[in-house]
Amino acid sequence: MSTDPHEAHARSEDATPVAAHDHPFSTPIIETELLRTFVAVVDSRSFTKAAARLGLSQPAVSGHIKRLQDHLVVDLFDKSVPGIHLTGLGHTVLKYAHDILATQKAMFRHIAGHEPGGNIIRIGVPLEIRCWTLVPALARFRATYSDYTFALCHQATSELHDRFERGEVDFFIGATTDSAAGARWSYRAPLAWVAARDSAAEPSDPLDIVLHPDGCIWTALMKSTLDGAGIGYRPVFTAPHIESVVAAVRAQMGVSTLPLAGTANAGDLRVIDRLPRLPDICWNIFVRTGAREAILERLTEIICPVIAAQARDGLM
């Protein structure tokens, strides 16, 4: 190896520097969750509506957008005008976001179609619904279609949506504020603030609330409604399952939200009229397209009356 300093200097002048973004390992990795949030904000033209649609809090949606802009080092939204308006690069990113999400969805669908165990129906149930209430309907389905078996998962709507997009769930029930695009069935139900019947008539300050973890639509709606009205609140009890939430309300730990119709069937709960009105929710059923679409449609016909009855009569 030559040690001539003049030769080394010549080599350094001839060398072409490599730009940081030209390096194969320097391209930032962007989570598809950030792209999905960006698309939801643009489609709904509102951070608040996007949060409700995704089952996230509004700060979480804002955080996703900030992280995406930080990754891309661009401004996606035009801040010089009110409302949701994209910059030129924002429109470009939106097009690629749609393409990336569609490609990911197609890939998982293709993989799912080649997996063994094709007769297993993977069902997603949101935390606001008790899984056992679906069992009689599933048993009726299997009495006719005995070749099929079931695997249930119980998660927040946003998590079920992501699993559905990844091809990990064939059929899922999701809660949104509006009838969701692509849903095979929807049922709208009003929500109400509820407290134990014997609890203090005047709500606490800050308001003690009982809720599901982030990612649940009820939690997102509770927080966004209180934030919009400027009402301070304090989460005092968080639990994943509806039974635990209702038990905490009954024990006078705080207030929560439940389907309005259901409170009439619960003598130990009462509706709180002094708090701001909550948006309605829509229960939606989504099924995977493909070879088993017809059988999943039949399952929808059997399950949807059960969901409607729960929304109408209460989940407690």
Image: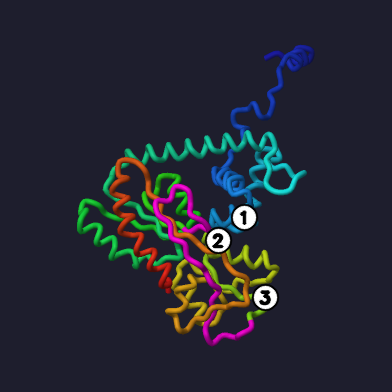
Figure quadrant of the N terminus:
top right
Do the numbered discs 1 and 2 sit on residues whose CB atoms are within 8 Å? yes
Q: Residue at x 50, y 62 (%)?
A: 281
Q: CA distance from mark 3 to mark 1?
A: 22 Å
Q: Which callout, 3 or 1, points at the residue further toward the start of the chain?
A: 1
Residue named by callout 3: 206
Please give the residue where the numbered disc 2 appears in the rendered image. 214
Name the spot of residue 154 as percent of width and height, x first: 41, 60
Where residue 125 sits, quadrant-wise, is: bottom left
What residue is shown at x 63% (from left), y 48% (from top)?
45
**Kind of residue at badge 2:** Asp
Disc 3 residue type? Pro
Q: Depth check: give the residue in front, 4 or 169.
A: 169
Distance from disc 1 to disc 2, alpha carbons, whole Å, reads 9 Å
Where does the C terminus fall, quadrant-wise? bottom left
Answer whether labels 3 and 1 touch (C-beta < 8 Å).
Answer: no
Q: Which residue is mark 1?
A: 60
Which segment did they paint magenta? 175-202
Looking at the image, residue 303 sits to the left or right of residue 177; the answer is left
